[in-house]
Amino acid sequence: MPKTPSPCIDVCKFRREGHCIGCSMTKAQKSMFKSLKKPAYQSAFVTMLMAQQKLLGKYTHWRIAYEKKCAKKGASFPTEL
């Protein structure tokens, strides 16, 4: 199983109450993802992040960018709940 790529899409502008305008992660969440070593935990994190994005809104562009990143790295896009 290939490693799950970071959900960061290289925008890294923390506005929206501390959430990145690109991926919706906070700085703490970015650090947390980096500490996750098991692919299952990383995939679960991305699934949680997608739920967060739905609640926050305004992140529809992220999915397209992240799907491209996953394809480039040979990883599958995590399924939604």
Image (cartoon, rainbow, N blue to C red):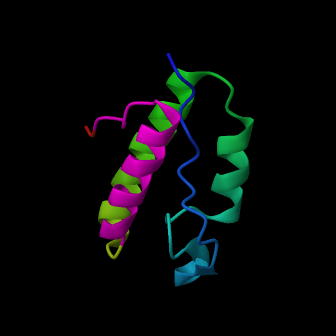
- Residue 4 appears at what percent x and percent y? 53, 33
Count all numbered tags in the image, as a single digit: 0
Quadrant location of residue 42?
top right
In the depicted structure, whether residue 38 falls above or below residue 5: above
Q: Does the segment drawn in magenta span residue 62?
A: yes
In the depicted structure, whether residue 7 falls above or below residue 23: above
Quadrant location of residue 71?
top left
- Residue 17 appears at what percent x and percent y? 56, 81
The residue at the point 52 percent across, 82 percent down is: 16
- Residue 54 appears at what percent x and percent y? 30, 62
Extreme residue in the left direction = 81
The residue at the point 40 percent across, 63 percent down is: 62
Name the side, left or right, on which 25 lies relative to 57: right
The residue at the point 57 percent across, 57 percent down is: 8
Q: Does the segment drawn in magenta span residue 33?
A: no
Q: Quadrant of the C terminus?
A: top left
Name the side, left or right, on which 22 lies relative to 50: right
Q: Main secondary structure of the magenta part?
A: helix
Region in magenta: 59-79
Name the side, left or right, on which 52 lies relative to 13: left
In this rendered view, identify the residue nearer to me: 77 or 56: 77
In the depicted structure, whether residue 33 falls above or below residue 21: above
Extreme residue in the front direction = 72
- Residue 72 appears at what percent x and percent y? 48, 41
In this rendered view, identify the residue nearer to me: 54 or 3: 3
